[in-house]
Image (cartoon, rainbow, N blue to C red):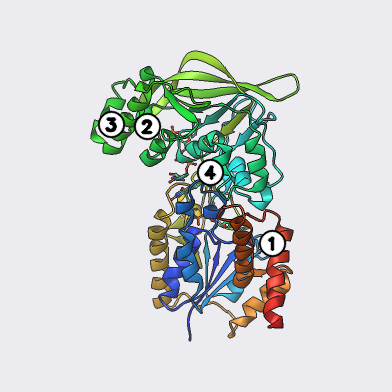
Amino acid sequence: VGSPRIAIIGAGPSGFYAADQLLKQGAEIDLVDALPTPFGLVRTGVAPDHPKIKSVTRIYERTATHEAFRFFGGVRLGADVSRQELLDRYDGVIYALGASADRRLEIAGEDLAGSHAATEFVAWYNGHPDFADRTFDLSRRRAVVVGNGNVALDVARMLALDPDELAGTDTADHALAALSGSRVEEIVVLGRRGAAQAAFTNPELLELGEMSRADVVVAAEDLELDPLSALVEDDAGARRRLEILRDYAARERTGRSHRIVLRFLCSPVAILGDAAGRVSGIRVARNRLEIERGRVRAVATGVEEDIECGLVLRAVGYRGEPLADLPFDATRGVIANRDGRVVSDDGVPLPREYVVGWIKRGPTGVIGTNKKDAAETVACVLADLNAGILRGPRPTHRDTASQWLRERVPHLVEWAGWQAIDVHERLAGEASGRPRVKLVRVGDMHEVSSARAVDAQAR
Ligand SMILES: Cc1cc2nc3c(=O)[nH]c(=O)nc-3n(C[C@H](O)[C@H](O)[C@H](O)COP(=O)(O)OP(=O)(O)OC[C@H]3O[C@@H](n4cnc5c(N)ncnc54)[C@H](O)[C@@H]3O)c2cc1C
Ligand SMILES: NC(=O)c1ccc[n+]([C@@H]2O[C@H](COP(=O)([O-])OP(=O)(O)OC[C@H]3O[C@@H](n4cnc5c(N)ncnc54)[C@H](OP(=O)(O)O)[C@@H]3O)[C@@H](O)[C@H]2O)c1
């Protein structure tokens, strides 16, 4: 009978937590990712000025030392391998694909040059190879960030950080160069609801107030609570948020060169362009709040205002995308599932297929949320194992799957190959006091990882 063999597709936090928990139960794990590099959004999402958060990868590196763990980077489900091929070779398949697409505003002007999804900007400054060639117009004084979540604060901070501070981070070189030449001095962050309903968290909000070259600007009148928001009296987190914001509103301007302006009760209605088709501003509507089915909702008052700017980044959430022929819940943007078991369109569990992380529950939650989420999925896998459901027509030898992947993907990057990339990047960073200098071209990653494989063979 032997150990169950599980393929996990997606090497972000949720894939690693599921791998770790299953290895502890005696499973054999092949962790597969479309990129040659592991760690998902920890590498390509988490802001470079948060190195402590990025250091969670040490936990994942420990998981990778397990002898029943293998990593196969550079393998994209849907392009290089199919769902059925995986089911033919493994007892179970767990999809941990994340949710990397962006949500749109669906307003006029959204596709003008200079209007982008924050997902692109984030992937660009973090050196995601698919985004390394993007460009962002940083030549105008003001940028506008739409959205009131932690991603909105991340991108606002990245635009306001001093180049000297950025220089000590693992921000991709192309982004360092562009940001150090940036003329953006004011970043306006727009929340469509009130301060009491903002989605960002308090440590991130406090960080804005400690920036070396930027003041945080909040208008006191934006913090006057309407009767609906007075309900926050019950919510300690929201009370603290308002305290922090009131402190910001009361601060004297220090005359720092840059400003992050937090505005509330403002929805974008159109992105405005110049004759050359470039963003020249954004039209916003002033909102008031209403309750609809128990949720506080923003409703336009009819009062509008134009804000001049050269760059608009919409940080209104990520979105999962349908993949291959997997059942998809389009309303929630997730693979259709119940507690982690993939289900058919009519809700019947599909044997041996599971889901975890953002593609299971939607694009919210911090890194740690995925650990608990993985535990729920792993419990389903183990229950199915005990019930005799988890047994695929897989070949008897474990190497058959790796052989197949090596033949299918000419530039497969295995764990030793990733370690070679990691060492290369860290060494390159040492010289300039940075945690690493990221390789941002897949070809360069292949070169570094295969040089290492050749070394190992020669030894
Ligand atoms: C900009 C940003 C900043 C964040 N900052 C923080 C933070 O500071 N602190 C914090 O706690 N949380 C933060 N988060 C949240 C955290 O990153 C997520 O909770 C977590 O990454 C979700 O994990 P996941 O494994 O579901 O998805 P992901 O991390 O997105 O991993 C999915 C993986 O699947 C791979 N993949 C996708 N499609 C395929 C395919 N077809 N075939 C093969 N592989 C595929 C991808 O390459 C990727 O490696 C941040 C999120 C964002 C977007
Ligand atoms: N440092 C960190 O810990 C960190 C950093 C980054 C991300 N993360 C986590 O990653 C997850 C994703 O973050 P996120 O910022 O992408 O998502 P999020 O927290 O869901 O925030 C999305 C924001 O966009 C707004 N929005 C949605 N549609 C809009 C529209 N059409 N017009 C205007 N505003 C709109 C939402 O407002 P409404 O509330 O009105 O819908 C909300 O303020 C979160 O759980 C976050 O905490 C954590």
| Label placed on residue 318 | 4
Q: Residue 386 or 213: which is nearer the viewer?
A: 213
**Quarter of the rendering occupied by the C terminus:** bottom right
Q: Which residue is label 3 attached to?
A: 232
Q: Nearer the viewer, mark 1 or mark 3?
A: 1
Mark nearer the N terminus (2 vs 1): 2
> Residue at the location (60% across, 29% down)?
312
Mark nearer the N terminus (2 vs 3): 2
Count of marks, rendered view: 4
Q: Residue 375 or 396: which is nearer the viewer?
A: 375
Q: Which residue is label 2 attached to?
A: 197
Indicate the amino acid at tag 1: Met
Mark nearer the N terminus (1 vs 4): 4
Indicate the amino acid at tag 3: Val
Q: Name the quadrant containing residue 310.
A: top right
Q: Of helix, strand and loop, which one carries label 2?
A: helix
**Residue labelled 1 has its Cβ within 8 Å of some atom of ligand 1:** no
Q: Nearer the viewer, mark 1 or mark 4?
A: 1
Q: Residue 421 or 118: which is nearer the viewer?
A: 421
Alpha carbon separation for disc pair 2 and 3: 9 Å
Mark nearer the N terminus (4 vs 2): 2
**Residue labelled 2 has its Cβ within 8 Å of some atom of ligand 2:** yes
Alpha carbon separation for disc pair 1 and 3: 49 Å
**Residue labelled 4 has its Cβ within 8 Å of some atom of ligand 2:** yes
Indicate the amino acid at tag 2: Gln
Q: Which residue is label 1 attached to?
A: 445
* Farthest residue, direction left: 234
- Residue 84, position as x, y percentages in the image: 62, 68
Alpha carbon separation for disc pair 2 and 1: 43 Å
- The reply to whether discs 4 and 2 touch (Cβ–Cβ < 8 Å) is no
27 shown above or below 334: below
